[in-house]
Amino acid sequence: MNKLLIIFLVFNFINADEISQSLVKNNDENSFITEYEYGKMLWKNPRGVSCVKCHAKDAKGKFISKFTHVTRKNTYNCFVKSNDITDISREDFIRKLDPSVKKKRIKFEKHQVCEKLIYGNTMPKYFLTKNEMNSIYYYITHIKDNDE
């Protein structure tokens, strides 16, 4: 029984991109949902944690949190904020979301303690399909002012 369940889950995961592509076709009159609507739905709740909570409704970014980091010699007051992602390139957007892409290693200066702690540790791994990433990208680059 467990083997059957595992096979079923693996099959569904492998075909998830094909299934999501069949639901969303850009400019197709017979489509179940438009790419904009699908992207909006994913933006609001991709895998249980809304993108809106950190990036704001308009994807322009916002203050998320603050924390204090204490070492033997110093105390650092750090804050976490998200950036405006409405003008990010598609390649950079997908690179940030794709868990298989390794983050660039950056050499931080001694005084950049907060930046070093935050770098690469704030964006959750959603394990989105390429189609889902493209739909979210489409949505955030086409957000309408009166969109609710």
Image (tube, grey):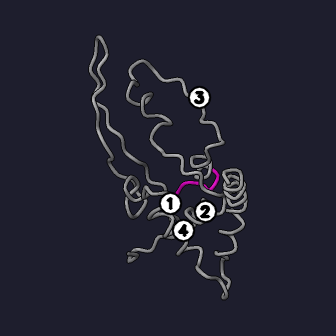
**Disc nearer the start of the sequence (3/4):** 4
Q: Residue placed at 46% from the left, 62% from the top?
A: 45
Quadrant including the C terminus: bottom left
Q: Position of residue 105 (x, y in %)?
A: 59, 29
Q: Position of residue 72 (x, y in %)?
A: 30, 11
- Determine crowd level at label 4: few under 14, some 14-19, many 20+ residues with C-alpha closer than 10 A: many
Q: CA distance from mark 2 to mark 1?
A: 9 Å
Q: Residue placed at 26% from the left, 20% from the top?
A: 75
> Of circles 2 and 3, which is in front?
2
Dot 3: element:
loop
**Disc nearer the start of the sequence (4/2):** 4
Whether 30 is among the magenta residues is no
> Which range of residues does the magenta coloring cover?
87-91
Identify the residue under disc 4: 39
**Disc nearer the start of the sequence (3/1):** 1
Q: CA distance from mark 3 to mark 4?
A: 30 Å
**Disc nearer the start of the sequence (2/1):** 1
Callout 4 amino acid: Gly
Q: Position of residue 122 (x, y in %)?
A: 44, 41
Callout 1 amino acid: Pro
- Tell me, yes or no, whether the two marked residues, 2 and 1, touch with CB atoms within 8 Å: yes
- Tell me, yes or no, whether the two marked residues, 4 and 1, touch with CB atoms within 8 Å: no
